[in-house]
Amino acid sequence: MTRDNRKHERILAKMPKLECDVCLGDIERYYDLSLEIVSLNNKLCNMVASSPSNANLFVSGRVVVLRDGVS
């Protein structure tokens, strides 16, 4: 685990736990869907960046936007 990851884990551990029974199911589903979206986005970025058959995507006159999740 990197130093940044440990720092983020400490910050998260200090945050109050979600205790609302009404919201908990929705929040958990939101987290699951968010994780799936990030995972699919990463797969897409890797596919585009690593496949020689996608080289024609990066030709002059074309704009390609890939979000790598790094802010």
Image (cartoon, helix red, strand yellow):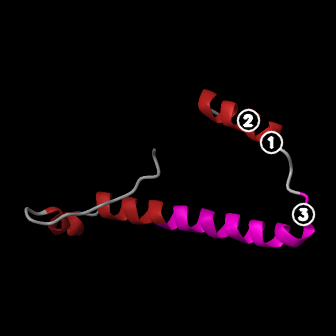
Asked which secondary structure carries label 1, the reply is loop
Which residue is label 2 attached to? 11
User: Residue flagged by tag 1: what amino acid is it?
Assistant: Met
Which amino acid lies under the numbered mark 2 shown in the image of this protein?
Ile
Instruction: Give the SS element for disc 3.
Output: loop
Picture residue at 15% right of the left edge, 68% below the top = 56
In this view, the mark in front (2 or 3): 3
Nearer-N-terminus badge (2/3): 2
Of the pair 35 and 26, the residue shown nearer to us: 26
The span picked out in magenta is 19-40
The part of the image, by quadrant, that contains residue 33 is bottom right
Do the numbered discs 2 and 3 sit on residues whose CB atoms are within 8 Å?
no
- Please check the rendered image and state whether residue 37 is part of the magenta-colored stretch, yes or no: yes
- Counting the numbered discs, the total is 3
Compute the Cα span from label 1 to label 2.
Answer: 7 Å
Q: Can you give x and y, in whole percent of width and height, for residue 53 in the image?
A: 22, 69
Main structural element of the magenta stretch: helix, strand or loop?
helix
Name the quarter where the C terminus is drawn. top left
Residue to which mark 3 is pinned: 20
User: Mark 2 falls on what kind of element?
Assistant: helix
* Left-right relation of 46 to 27: left
> Is the residue marked by circle 3 packed among few (<14), some (14-19), or many (20+) residues within 10 Å?
few
* C-alpha separation, residue under disc 3 versus residue under disc 1: 15 Å
- CA gap, disc 2 and disc 3: 21 Å
Q: Residues within 10 Å of mark 2 (few under 14, many from 20)?
A: few
In the image, taking residue 18 as reference, residue 70 lies left or right, namely left
Q: Which residue is mark 1?
A: 15
Task: Write the residue at 82% across / 72% down.
Answer: 25
